[in-house]
């Protein structure tokens, strides 16, 4: 259980699941798996009727967003983003990490009719970025990890806003209102989890959460937003306990299952020159756009705020953060599904582009993280003799 809480282990499991999905889709069992993914399962007595794939991406993935929302709330209220001075530098870098990839994607796809996919290369996968940092980053200064964590969290906020606004069609305001009531009730119930009626309260919260999710799904808003709203509404202490309890399930089951189904794509049997503009837009914008955007945004942010409050990040440090930000994976795959929901072939090519772009970012980030870690280890070693001489004096 403790192993799956590890950022390193979570990243490996996620990558393995995606690789297995892509491999399985291109073997003899591929068609059967895709048929299973498309098979519909309904809930008797309700209008809910989703395919297996959508139960995963709309249902189970809401658990992941619930956990993310709890972390977001903690960081915004008591963590690394609880003041403007703490948030300003990663916020500017995050803006650069959204604008530049979006601009590159739009420049490549302009006139193709697929401009709607511009949000796909703007996302960062927290689990992968921090997992790669844990694998190769022994000796990395804490300020870089804090910067990357804040950057990824702000990226998630942007992704949540994009999903809630751009990928919502014909929203039913009445159902949204009912869902808002459900969120409020969930939040009130969470404040009584420490009472003697803890078990009945927890059961009631689960029921309210499921009803709220169903209302959000039926309203036309993407159902993962229900997870976000519920996570933000929960009282702090029980929320942190719940996050701790759900983390193994989210890391070890929800995300790998989503990655497996999202990567369940048959590799197109066409020459590279015949691949669609979205493929090239994502493939270039994700690793290159993120690297340039975050590095440039981080550099501009160094001129903002009081000198004493801005932690110094070198050019190598900013480039490392940018490369890690290019690992879009989970949220990019979800946005790809949403953006190209009506274009199966383009969605498949988009999935391949997200996977390839993320792998390129992983390789570049692995090299940069290793170099940065080695540099800081050398600096730490060279400082030790000086400290010993000072002690002798």
Image (tube, rainbow, N blue to C red):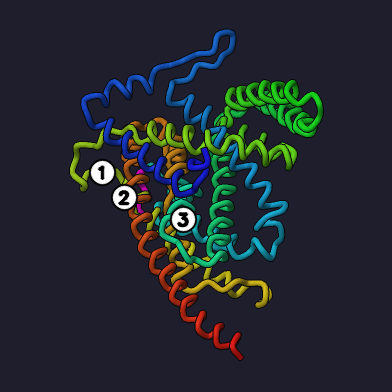
Question: Which residues are drawn in magenta?
Answer: 108-112
Q: Pointers 2 and 1 in contact (CB under 8 A)?
A: yes
Q: Is residue 51 magenta?
A: no
Q: Which residue is mark 2?
A: 280
Q: Nearer the viewer, residue 248 or 310?
A: 248
Circle 3 crowding by C-alpha within 10 Å: few under 14, some 14–19, many from 20: some
Q: Is residue 111 magenta?
A: yes
Q: Is residue 116 visible?
A: no
Label 3 secondary element: helix
Query: Where is 177 relative to 288, above or below?
Result: above
Which residue carries the number 1 mark? Answer: 275
Counting from the top left corner in percent of width and height, residue 221 is at 58, 31
Q: Residue furthest top?
A: 45
Task: Write down the residue under mark 3.
Answer: 134
> How far apart are labels 1 and 3 at the CA level?
35 Å
Give how far apart the Cα atoms at labels 3 and 2 are.
30 Å
Dot placed on the residue nearer the N-terminal end, 3 or 2 = 3
| Nearest-to-viewer mark from 3 and 2 | 3
x, y percent for residue 37 = 38, 23
């Amino acid at each position: 259980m403790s192993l799956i809480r590890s950022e390193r282990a979570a990243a490996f499991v996620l990558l393995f699941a995606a690789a297995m999905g892509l491999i399985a889709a291109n073997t003899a069992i591929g068609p059967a798996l895709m048929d299973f993914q498309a098979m519909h399962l309904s809930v008797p007595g309700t209008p809910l009727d989703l395919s297996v794939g959508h139960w995963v991406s709309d249902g189970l993935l809401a658990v992941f967003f619930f956990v993310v929302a709890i972390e977001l709330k903690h960081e915004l209220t008591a963590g690394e983003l609880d003041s403007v001075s703490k948030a300003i530098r990663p916020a500017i870098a995050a803006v650069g990490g959204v604008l530049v990839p979006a601009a590159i994607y739009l420049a490549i796809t302009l006139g193709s009719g697929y401009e709607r996919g511009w949000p796909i290369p703007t996302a960062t996968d927290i689990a992968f970025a921090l997992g790669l940092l844990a694998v190769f980053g022994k000796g990395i200064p804490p300020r870089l990890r804090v910067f990357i964590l804040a950057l990824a969290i702000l990226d998630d906020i942007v992704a949540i806003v994009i999903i809630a606004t751009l990928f919502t069609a014909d929203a039913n305001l009445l159902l949204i209102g009912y869902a808002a009531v459900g969120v409020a009730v969930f939040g009130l119930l969470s404040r009584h989890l420490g009472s003697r009626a803890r078990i009945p309260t927890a059961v009631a919260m689960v029921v309210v959460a499921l009803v709220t999710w169903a209302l959000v799904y039926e309203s036309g808003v993407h159902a993962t937003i229900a997870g976000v709203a519920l996570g933000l509404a929960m009282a702090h202490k029980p929320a942190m306990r719940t996050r701790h309890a759900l983390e193994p399930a989210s890391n070890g089951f929800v995300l790998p299952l989503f990655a497996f189904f999202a990567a369940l794509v048959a590799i197109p049997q066409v020459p590279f020159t015949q691949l669609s503009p979205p493929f090239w837009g994502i493939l270039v914008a994700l690793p290159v756009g993120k690297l340039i955007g975050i590095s440039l945004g981080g550099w501009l942010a160094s001129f903002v705020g009081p000198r004493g409050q801005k932690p110094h990040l070198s050019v190598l440090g900013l480039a490392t953060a940018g490369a890690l930000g290019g690992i879009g994976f989970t949220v990019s795959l979800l946005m790809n599904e949403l953006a190209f929901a009506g274009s199966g072939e383009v969605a498949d090519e988009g999935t391949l582009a997200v996977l390839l772009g993320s792998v390129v970012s992983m390789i570049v980030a692995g090299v940069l993280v290793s170099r940065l870690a080695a540099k800081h280890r050398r600096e730490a070693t060279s400082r030790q003799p000086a400290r010993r001489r000072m002690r002798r004096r």
